[in-house]
Image (cartoon, coloured by chain):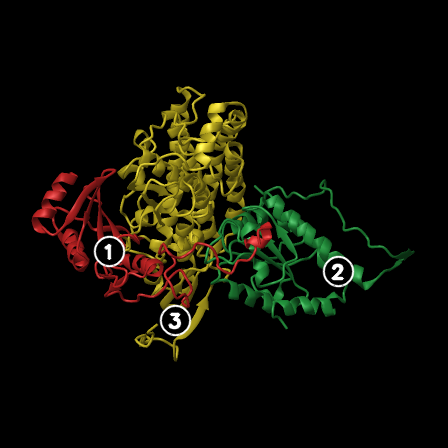
Amino acid sequence: MNEHHLKLAEESLEKETTTINVGPTHPATHGVFQNIMEIDGERVLSTVPTIGYIHRAFEKIAERRPYYQITPLTDRLNYCSAPINNIGWHLTIEKLVGMEIPKRVQYLRVIIMELARIADHLVCNSVIGVDTGALTPFTYVFQWREKIYEIYEEICGSRLTTNIGRIGGFERNFTEAAWQKLHAFIEGFPAMLKEFEDLLDRNRIFMDRCIGAGPISAERALSYSFTGPNLRASGVDYDVRVHSPYSSYDEFEFEIPVGTTGDVYDRYLVRNKEMWESLGIIKQALVKVKDLDPSVYHAEAPDFYLPEKADVYSKMEALIYHFKIIMGETDLPAGEVYNAVEGANGELGYYLISDGGRSPYRLHFRRPCFIYYQAFPEIVSGGLLSDAIVALSSLNVIAGELDA
Amino acid sequence: MARPVQYNENKKVTFAPIPDGYQGEGFMATKFDKVIGLARANSLWPLPFATSCCGIEFMATMGANYDLARFGSERMGFTPRQCDMLLVAGTIAKKMAPILRQVYLQMAEPRWVIAIGACASSGGIFDSYSVLQGIDQVIPVDVYVPGCPPRPEGILDGILKLQEIVKNESLRRRHSDQYKGLLNEYGIQ
Amino acid sequence: MTNQEIKQLLSERFPELSEWEESYGMLTFRVPPDRNLEIANAIFHDEQLQFRFLTDITAVHYPDRVGEELCVVYHFHNLVDNVRIRMKTYVPVSQPDVFSLAPLFAGANWMERETYDFYGVNFIGHPNLTRILNVDEMDYFPMRKEYPMEDPTRRDKDDEMFGRG
């Protein structure tokens, strides 16, 4: 890189700039990114990020996999909120084939997606705490994140990379234990979140570290194609759940929190507020689900929805459909579709080109992390090196999503 | 109001078993192998090399619910120089492989490696041009933990398995020709 | 603003736009490869169109379409009226030159680098068109259809492992 243009400020006490290398295995970077930083004392003059350290070729693999086998790939994009990725992918296929999804399934999906959003924001915000020296909130919230994982486990059997749901709905109905755990979570979580906020929100050290650190203006954020909480912290109220509602989000009442300065503190506050809103959405969904037929958990789409295993072993028709789906003999329409969901980090887009075959001709993921991490040099330059670390954790860059 | 202080008086504390040896009043004689193995096994300092999903599960393992500290491994060292146990959690891409090897080389003997999860063990579901098909292509591995990602219980089990290995390792193993031969296979002198 | 109005506005100003279609509600059109920046600039600054948010840049490889094998796809979003459009441009794989949108959108920088990394599309005017995800030493563009997905050095999938050797 051409670093020769970097000049020390007149008032600088340093004789020359220092080049330091942060990453790819640096403890302060949560994930594998490398930043070669040019610093003047403690002030960051420039940084050159290098990424690709866990590039796994998702898009190439997706071209060779049948549609239902791509769900596990999407798990591993943003693994802190895997269910949103899974359901986003299923919504894309459903949009392609024009499938009608029963209301109850849509509400159940909303519940799962909002739980995932809470889990993701919990990790991000508590890690900002860790980076500013507060380890206690981290250990608190991880207990509650475990409770979310237990709910996932009741529904799909897995914790982190959930592979939740199928094209057309869920693979099984929510069990009684799942409902109980969900209700217990709704009841207990607000007290924890309140305590978490009490620990950090007005904490002098935390505020001093976060306010004014790593800011980005709304214009620059838009120019960098920011979406999600990071854009909202700059003051733009763009949210895919409202702008292009999917899965019946238009029936829910919720607020889109926005910040003003786009600094670390605003991003933290926006995420915290979003957790409250998510909790509200889940409560509304629970009410809506009550009135609906509790036996419905998937769409009537035998061409795409994998039949239950017990039926496959005992019923001829189910066996035939199972065979057809697994062997890729169902016809998908050719066409191209772009579908976006509000991932925990922003607009998670799926650009799918189908040529009618059993796997996509081309599948491109619009990965919010990848797109906004390029603003990192601009966000941190001029600030302190320690601010760069909190700025990185407040952006919530997930390496899996960054590197595809 | 002062917060009530709680002590874990009612909690059962387990001690590591005394190794075989000759005991009498006020003394005990045993082999260095056993004593050092015991000490090493119960104070393994982990170096988390967390790249992706498995790293998040490793965070859960360290967290309050699963509490890796119970097994003497609470001291995360983020410098390879001080650590004994390299935990490779997550996919290692080919771009990352030289760095992983570098970290391994920087660790002092004796060093042990756990490959956490399918990706670190074999490449996992990522059978692609950019992913290293198992870290054992670049560094020797002691314990493989299956799962994509493994549950925290699985990771704990892997660490307990490694403790067994460490406990029973001969002090001379690292100087043996067999061990040197193993490292030579990886091009490590 | 409806797709019909956008189409009308655009085709009046730029008669060379072609292949209009509406797939799943999104208006799609094709631009000549040497005009992509100009048209993106025009729809950015137009008072009515206001496509000022770049959602995504990617490419698709069609080996069978001789002379226009690579298709660069742009997604734009008008956040005021909440409309999305898709712009495509086709380039031959032998000379995949299009103009970079980096002067217009700061976010185009890495999206174009990724597209270059995967498909080798040459974005003219890009400030730093180098590989981003793959290793620098890589000498091919892995997402093109002719390259295999698998790791070519992998030996445990050889036939002899399955008794077919």
Chain that bears disc 2: B
Percent of width and height locating residue A73 = 45, 46
Q: Residue furthest bottom?
A: A15
Residue, disc 1: C68
Q: Quadrant of the C terminus of chain B?
A: bottom right
Q: Is residue B55 above or below residue B110?
A: above
Image side of residue C46 versus residue C62, left or right: left
Can residue B67 be seen in this snapshot? no
Q: Colour of chain C?
A: red
Q: Secondary structure at mark 3?
A: strand
The subunit carrying tag 1 is C
| Amino acid at circle 1 | Glu
Image x and y of residue A109, in percent: 40, 32
* Mark 2 on the same chain as mark 3: no
What residue is shown at x 11% (from left), y 49% (from top)? C47
Where residue B33 appears, as percent x and y from the top left, is: 79, 62
Q: Neighbour class for label 1 at 10 Å: few (<14), some, many (≥20)?
A: some
Q: Which residue is mark 3?
A: A38
Instruction: Between residue A306 and residue A347, name the one nearer to us.
Output: A306
Please state which of the two labelled residues, at mark 1 or mark 2, is closer to the viewer: 1
Indicate the quadrant containing the N terminus of chain B: top left, top right, bottom left or bottom right. top right
- What element does badge 2 sit on? loop
Q: Residue furthest left?
A: C12
- Within 10 Å of disc 2 (Cα), the crowding (few <14, some 14-19, many 20+) is some
Q: Which residue is mark 2?
A: B169
Q: Colour of chain A?
A: yellow
Of residues A39 and A344, the one nearer the viewer is: A344
When asked about the image quadrant of residue A21, the answer is bottom left
- Contact, mark 3 vs mark 1 (Cβ under 8 Å): no
User: Which of the chains bears the disc numbered 3?
Assistant: A
Cα separation, mark 1 vs mark 2, equals 64 Å
Q: Residue at x 39, y 58 (%)?
A: C142
